[in-house]
Amino acid sequence: MSHHIVEFKNVSFRYPDGTDALRDISFRITHGESVGIIGANGAGKSTLLLHMNGYLMPTSGTVNIGDLYLTRQTRQEIRRKVGVVFQNPDDQLFMPTVYEDVAFGPLNLGMDEKSVRERVEYALNLVSSLELQNKPPHHLSCGQKSSVAIAAVMAVEPDILAMDEPAANLDPRSRRLLINLLKTFEHSKIIASHDLDLIMDVCQRCIVIREGTVVADGPVMEILTNKQILEENHLELPLSLQRN
Amino acid sequence: MHMADALLSPAVGATMWAGSVAAIGYSSKKLKENIDNKTIPLMGVMGAFIFAAQMINFTIPGTGSSGHIGGGMILAVILGPYAAFLAMASILTVQALFFADGGLLALGCNIWNLGIYPCFLVYPLIYKPIAGDGKSTRRISAAAMISVIIALQLGAFSVVMETLLSGKSELPFNTFVLLMQPIHLAIGLVEGIVTAGMINYVRKAQPEILEANSFSRPLDAGISIKNILIAFVILAVVTGGALSWFASTHPDGLEWSIEKVTGKGELKEATQGIAPFLKGIQEKTAFLPDYNFKPADKEEPKGNETPAWPGIETGTSFAGILGGSIVLMFILLIGFGIRFFKKR
Amino acid sequence: MTFDEKYYNIGFLDQLSYKNTIVHRLDPRAKVIITLLFLFTVISFPKYEIVALLPFFLYPVLLMTLGEIPFMFIFKKVVFVSPFAVFIGIFNPLLDSGQVSIFHGFMISAGWFSFFSILIKFTLTVSTALLLIATTSFPNVCHALRQLGLPSLFVSQLLFLYRYIFVLMEETMRIVRARNMRSYEKRGHGIRVFVRIIGILFLRTVERAERIYFAMLSRGFQGDMPTLKRFHFSRGDLGFAVFFIVFLFIFRFYPATEILGRFVQGVFS
């Protein structure tokens, strides 16, 4: 299974209004790696994630997921490989009940009802939320919504998990549960976040981006202890490192 | 103004339901043919937006009273007629269920009054021609104002017609129209200002939204006048068919017709103008006339030999009152009984 | 009602619909159909009818008690939406002035009968509609509608709407609260501010739609909303439906109340 790689080669992207969100960005993430992507607001983190499953197409350069180059033809296939969890679970959970939401992906894969049920139960068990299955999302707490959003993505069994600010709006306990949950996944993980403690806990590697390009890339402890890099990018030392 | 179940007759309710469901089916079909997948969530969320916006009260200038918006025109401008109509129909359905605004049978009327007019009549025939290519703020404002007012006037007039055709209200046509239209003119003015303001606000902030969804849309996604005419012809046929079905299955449904009331000459207004027409419709549309099915009452109590008012002779006797009280007591008893046993 | 009240009101009704009682467990199709039949039967009564309508209170009473729905909640909502029907109906006693003797020469204007008839029909129809949604979760109502043949595009529209009214109401509530907190002397309640508010809300909504669309795409959405078959019509559902169809039929076509009254009258005289 050495082919679960994510490779960006000289990728640039310009929004229709003329903003250059990505400029000649290149990196390669190999199988099973957990990578944190950090940077100031507007540095291009979200745009980067939107390329991971082909919602946006690079203006120039190539994106390689698994063994597939991202094109309009391969988009659907790539979407099966990369599960993206968005920042706001309310946008992610668009079906009227938890069960239907988690079943959305498997049903779109054309699975029959029995296998769908198995998948849904498996995914909800993964985040210990099976008892929520008949509830509508608006009856859930923020932490529960995040868990279900992750389950909804895990139900399609993606090879690679990409997350945008997974812990935003979570209370400390829910955040801790989420971190523990993420640690148990053996997938390649790509996590864009301002929560440097979370990145430090979950990831081995860290990429810093600024103005759409990579400014630092290395082992997580190296980067998150480098005050200079962090401050240049409107970031601070992780709280757990500030005390000593 | 939402129509209410209690003021409806089954014939009018069913006809309007048929019309609205047909329009829903037609719009879904049309939309499916050339929908951008992106529109599916947009419609839903836009519906929720209008729903939430309707709940905000604002002060109407110079009056101190508060109003809220209807939103049909805003939706039509943003989503185009078919999607806007489906969004509006779904909003009204949710309101009928959660707020009991109107009711489930009146839902057909309400979808018709608040959805069909703005989306299929006013938007293509009035808004589009006036707004033109959507580049002039003044033209858009004028278009929004005029369309909203006209759509509301049509809706209000429909409420009048639906109520009168149902024959549950004694309001004469003239009075009713004079009550409804001016009120809705005032409401329309306010909503027109809001709609115009909002469309212009969006144009300034993010013009591409309006362009993407309305102005630059290929013509076939809009509505041609020919299609409208066809739709209305179909509707006329459906309505006529429904009415004649009622008429043929229940030819002698006279019992609750307005004739019993107006025939006595008690109401001057009702004997002229629209009354004879209404009377005719009433006679044809009486649904499942009551007396046809009653077992013949041989032992009619004495007090009812010369009923003063033919329409209500049944059930007004002492026996009726007595029976009614017993039934109510019985139902209450069942209710309390269930509550009692549930608690234990 | 203020915005907050409306929001919590609809939220409470929504919460009720997820209870687990015998009424909630009935097949939603059965409930939707019987409710519609019920409504049609009620409004098919002649305009002066009062007494024959009374037995029909059994249906809402059963739904309410077996479904454990608080009476006062439904009652308040019914009263709250009554103005239009009352407004239109109150003209009847004034305009329909024929005199009717109800009891040993006691005369009353015929319009009162039609007015009370409207009020009773109003109470029956509105409370039954509310009880339908209080005992059936909205997604279930939608699935029932789909299975009863409404276009799936429209049904998925309803489901989206249901999903996002709560999200958007919360967002709106935050904006409205901010407005109310800073609009001393009500100066911030005018149309201008209102237009701004809904303008902002609109733009946020468009952005949200975009994000939702992205979330759908990333889980394989290609234009069709997948659906699950989930109901089977049980014997209990059938029993419920048959019972109420017979009930509606009997009390629509036979003046059972009056016969009962006459019978009791006969016994005591």
Image: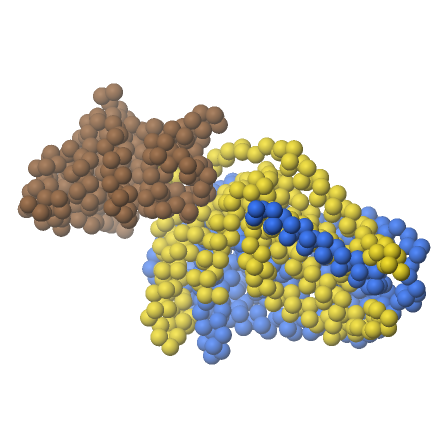
Chain colours: A brown, B blue, C yellow
User: Which residue is at the far bottom?
Assistant: B62
Q: Which of C210 and C72 is in front in this view?
A: C72
- Look at 61% across and 50% down and name the residue there: B340
| Nearer to me, A179 or B132 | A179
Q: In this view, does A225 lie above or below B270?
A: above
B170 relative to A209, above or below: below
Q: Which of B55 and A176 is in front in this view?
A: A176
| Residue B164, x across and y down, in percent | 72, 64
Q: Quadrant of residue A39 in the image? A: top left
Q: Give how far across and how far down residue A156 sits, in percent.
A: 37, 30
Residue positioned most to the front: B344
Most extreme residue toward the top, as rendered? A1
- Whether residue B214 is visible here, answered yes or no, is no
Q: Between residues B208 and B39, which one lies in front from this camera angle?
A: B39
* B81, above or below C226, in the image: below
Residue at 82 percent across and 73 percent down: it is C107
Tell me if I can see residue C88 in this picture: yes
Q: Which residue is pictured at 65% across the width and 68% down the height?
A: C86
Residue C249 in percent (x, y) is at 77, 46
Q: In this view, does B232 lie to the left or right of A86?
A: right
For residue A201, which quarter of the picture?
Answer: top left
Question: In this rendering, would A144 be left or right of C118?
Answer: left
Residue B304: image x %, image y %? 90, 65
Which of the image's four quarters has the N terminus of chain B?
bottom right
Q: How many marks?
A: 0
Above or below for A129 versus B26: above
Instruction: Identify which residue is drawn at 49% across, 78% down.
Output: B63
Left or right for A117, reference B94: left
